[in-house]
Image: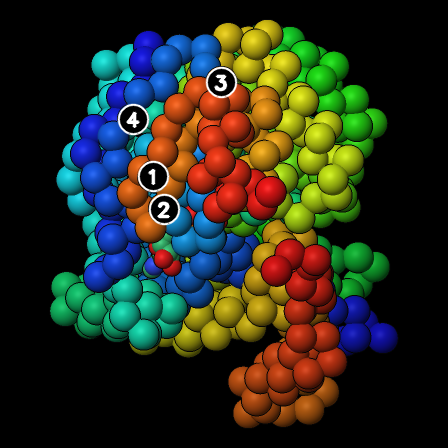
Amino acid sequence: MFTFIDTLLIGLTSGAVYSLMAIALVLVWRSTRVVNFAQAGQALLSTYIGYECMGRFHSFWIALALAMILGAGVSALIEMLFMRTLFKRNTGPIAGVAPIIATLGLLGIIRGGIGIFMGGKETIIRPPLSNVGFTISGHTFALSPFKLVILSAVLIMMILLSLIFTKTNIGLALRASAYAPEIARLAGVKVDAIRTLGWAIAGAAGAAAGMLQTPNGTGALSPDSLEFSLLLVFGFIAAVIGGLESLVGAVIGGLLLGLVLAIVLMYVNATLLFMTAFVLLIVVLLVRPQGIMGKKAGRRA
Amino acid sequence: MTLIVSELCVDHGAIRAVDHVSLRIEQGQLAAVIGANGAGKTTLLRALSGLTPARSGSATWKGHDLLHSKPEKLVRFGVSHVSEGKSVIPELSVEENLNLGALWRRNAKESEQTRNKIFETFPRLEERAGQLADTLSGGERQMLAIGRALMAKPELLLLDEPSLGLAPLVIAQIFQSIRDLTTQMGLTVVLVEQNALGALEIADVGIVLNLGRIAATDRAQSLIENPQVRAAYLGY
Ligand SMILES: Nc1ncnc2c1ncn2[C@@H]1O[C@H](COP(=O)(O)OP(=O)(O)OP(=O)(O)O)[C@@H](O)[C@H]1O
Ligand SMILES: [Mg+2]
């Protein structure tokens, strides 16, 4: 019984980090209709930035904040200097997929670059709070103070972003630019700037995912670490399962994925981890092609 | 405050859609632009609002160069464009579609006043304020599209086929609203229409486009009485 509860708790926390990553992917998708494969690379870069900040300021929390701010900046720059040019230049037959493929290229470049400059160096980020579980009547549960922080951070992030999207002028501009850029422009929305903003928020969310994922795992940071492969693949799967359009969907997708994987890990076999994730992805796409929270294509032609 | 277009040419690849068009629309006038399918009406409007780049020529209004400015900038100069085919965002509510039009003004109080005026003109929109625009009828969508444009407090309004796909009775209502709004708000309006007679009846001046060129331009009433225009565009 305790094992089962622990499995669920582990699943929820690791799922929460996938959710954050999925939120980042959803934000980019909503603002520019691009699936950003470079997101995990950006998260990796931001986590390295966070690591450097920790060395300077000796506080995980300051480092987390700076990683998010600088991660947002990097993401905004990528959109402004790289993606925007790509969109404007690409009008040929592959214009629809070219930006997506380009983000794959970018992922390789970021990873490679980090490998050149940071590879081989031992880089460890330790959790700022105890990652040893709470003990209740003799049993130490898998829920630690740090995991509790991760869970609440993700929920707060989701609620905050949902409120921004639905209740503020910026959110209205973000949604309008995503749904109908031309009408948004005619209404006076500076769509280019809004797209950059969407990427910036995504960069911050991805940075948070990287900064939380690393110390929740082994703590070791490297361009080829398993943690970032997990973020890359599972963040993406969580976003698609959730419908790619919806922040709530991203969170549900991440948590669901985390739970399923934790159960497989505990009761079946660790080698099935990636396969299970892909099976889940394909089953959801077959049964509910629009994702858990996605809407069926509307009346719109 | 006169809209002055001079020798305007717009190409779509090898096709010249607007061919040396020159026209003058005085402030406060409602100008109907009529012509067959593919005559270049939509292209003309899109060039004037900065959506489609022009090949050559000039267009100025209030001293602003319309051809080399982005639409989001032109809105701030008072140019609002309702593009062809119900220019609303179905995923947003009626109220959000309206608010969108006034976002750049950053003045919630003024926006609310403008919105209330629009609700007076189109009471249907107020009844449906919370609904998704997706659930509106064609006529309501067109009202919403016009309402969204009005939220920017425009002085020059570019309307592309507001009658598209609407029933005759609804068309008459929309046309009447356009006429009333023009007079009440002192707007300058360029109204592109397939529904030539209806548009000319409410317009001050009329412009007939044919294969991208101006075929005739005159007071709207004179065009209605012109036998050639009647035969070719009004169908009687
Ligand atoms: N995006 C485009 N690419 C290529 N050709 C275009 C494009 N848009 C319009 N055209 C062509 O330009 C010409 C003028 O089109 P336009 O849409 O301006 O006509 P219109 O007068 O608005 O017609 P309608 O009454 O059917 O709306 C047509 O020959 C059309 O095929
Ligand atoms: Mg047209």
Residue type at numbered disc 4: Leu
Instruction: Give the quadrant of the C terminus of chain A.
Output: bottom right
Residue type at numbered disc 3: Asp
**Upstream in sequence: badge 3 or badge 4:** 4
Which color scheme did the rendering employ for the protein?
Answer: rainbow
Instruction: Give the quadrant of the N terminus of chain A.
Output: bottom right
Q: Label 3: state its secondary structure.
A: loop
Q: Position of residue A13 (x, y in %)?
A: 63, 61
User: Label 2 near label 1: C-beta < 8 Å?
Assistant: yes
Q: Is residue B137 left or right of residue A85?
A: right
State the CA–CA distance, disc 4 to disc 1. 12 Å
Q: Position of residue B58 (x, y in %)?
A: 19, 30
The answer as to whether the residues below labels 1 and 3 share one chain is yes
User: Label 4 near label 3: C-beta < 8 Å?
Assistant: no
Query: What residue did someone put label 2 on?
Result: B210
Q: Label 1: state its secondary structure.
A: strand
Query: What residue did someone put label 3 on?
Result: B204
- Which one is in front, A241 or A171? A171
